[in-house]
Amino acid sequence: MAKRTLKIFRFNPETDDKPSYKSYTVEPEGWWTVLDALNAIKWEQDGTLTYRRSCRHGICGSCAMQINGLNDLACEKQLKALPRDPIQIDPLPGFEIYKDLVVNMEPFYAALKRIKPWLINDEPPPKRERLQSPEQFKQMGTSIACILCAACTSSCPSFWSDQEYLGPAALLKAFRYTFDSRDMGLNDRIEQLDNKHGLWRCHKITNCFTACPKDLNPPEAISRLQRKVVSEKM
Ligand code: SF4
Ligand code: FES
């Protein structure tokens, strides 16, 4: 495969006055992803380049970053799907930058914790597991496939303007539990959901839908959750 150039955002707050871009050229194999290119740069050209990655299989969500201006997973985006050079790589927007492509994910995890992302059910457990029919399982839709990569929340203008906003990923997780037939925790979550930093901050801009590398649909989940919360209050 022909040589490719990556123009990568670089910033070390401990030594740099301001961010800059640095270009690197790699000689990729045909199957390389953006993450393979970043690894080649880090391992063979510049060990100071800093980014997150772990599974390399689109499962852990660690490698979310901006690729040519769009949030995506570096380990899933193949270079051959990005025909023009240079390929520009930036950190996820909306978060404080720790170094290069590594951002402070604390606001993201703090929002997630606020909606209590676990099964809430005070009834005594049955002898075996709490069962669910296929129809009940379908109510959760594809929300169970979320890998918490933050590509959605980071692409959301409502989150950029309000860091207290729960954001699409946390709201999708709230949907996942609220529509789980085994969960009884809506009352425990409703205070966080039903306020100006919760469900009602979503203006259906749908950047999150476009950004999600797993083709999930946070805006639809948020709409269903909004209707559920309103019906609970009636
Ligand atoms: S909804 Fe999609 S983009 Fe958002 S955290 Fe989950 S997998 Fe990532
Ligand atoms: S390295 Fe795990 S999702 Fe990309």
Image (tube, rainbow, N blue to C red):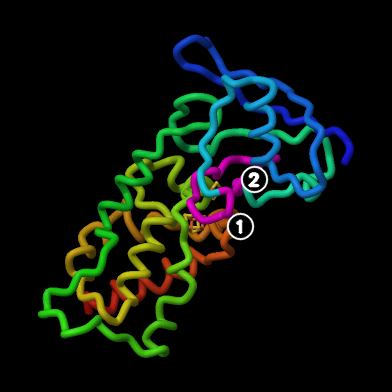
Mark 2 vs 1: CB contact within 8 A: yes
Nearer the N terminus, badge 2 or badge 1? Answer: 2
The residue wearing badge 1 is 210
The residue at the point 38 percent across, 45 percent down is 108
The residue at the point 82 percent across, 47 percent down is 30
| Pointer 2 local density, CA inside 10 Å: few below 14, some 14–19, many at least 20 | some
Q: Which segment is the magenta one? A: 56-74
Please, what secondary structure does the residue beneath circle 1 have?
A: helix
- Looking at the image, the residue that sits furthest to the right is 2
Circle 1: residue type? Thr
In front: 171, or 29? 29
Please, what secondary structure does the residue beneath circle 2 have?
A: strand
In front: 60, or 227? 60
The label number, if any, that marks residue 70 in the structure image: 2
Specify whether 79 is left or right of 64.
right
Q: Image height check: is 167 above or below 182?
A: above
Circle 2: residue type? Leu
Distance from mark 1 CB to nearest ligand 1 atom below 8 Å: no
